[in-house]
Image (cartoon, rainbow, N blue to C red):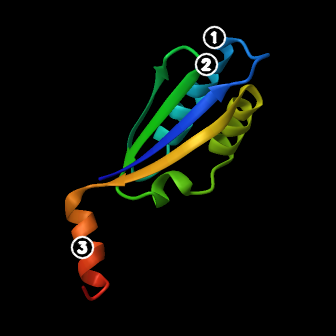
């Protein structure tokens, strides 16, 4: 499994409830993509939401989708992305390392 983790900080003028609803809408859109096992959001104290997507590969949540694009724009109207991480499981990491001829 791989994980995509976005940190989105609330803009000063944005309402927290609207930010939460936008994060939830993005999670629902991402969950609708093939190869995505789940997507949830969490609060990191009170001004940042952290969105965690889980899937077979990062390509799963990067697939072009009008629903994901619409939800992303709605979210980024209310917040700004301040960080992104990708985590891969140990087996996938080892497979990549081995395929590189190491």
SS at badge 3: helix
- Identify the mark nearer the N-term, 3 or 2: 2
Which residue is depicted at the point 51% across and 51% down? 61
- On residue 21, the disc is 2
> Horizontal placement of 73 versus 63: left or right?
right
Q: CA distance from mark 1 to mark 2?
A: 6 Å
- Mark 3 crowdedness (10 Å alpha carbons): few <14, some 14-19, many ≥20: few
- On residue 95, the disc is 3
Residue 51 placed where, x, y %?
Answer: 49, 34
Which residue is depicted at the point 51% across and 33% down? 27
Residue topped by disc 1? 17
Marks 1 and 2 in Cβ contact (< 8 Å)? yes
Q: CA distance from mark 3 to mark 2?
A: 38 Å
- Mark 1 crowdedness (10 Å alpha carbons): few <14, some 14-19, many ≥20: few
> Horizontal placement of 100 versus 43: left or right?
left
- Mark 2 crowdedness (10 Å alpha carbons): few <14, some 14-19, many ≥20: few
> Horizontal placement of 22 versus 27: left or right?
right
SS at badge 2: helix
- Identify the mark nearer the N-term, 1 or 3: 1
């Amino acid at each position: 499994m791989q994980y995509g983790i976005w940190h989105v900080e609330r803009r000063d003028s944005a309402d927290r409830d609207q930010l939460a609803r936008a994060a939830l809408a993005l999670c629902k859109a991402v969950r609708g993509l093939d190869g995505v096992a789940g997507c949830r959001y969490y609060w990191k104290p009170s001004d940042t939401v952290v969105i965690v997507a889980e899937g077979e590969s990062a390509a799963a949540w990067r697939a072009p989708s009008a629903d994901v694009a619409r939800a992303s724009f709605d979210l980024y109207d209310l917040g700004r992305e301040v960080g992104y991480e990708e985590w891969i499981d140990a087996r996938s990491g080892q497979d990549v390392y081995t395929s590189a001829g190491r």
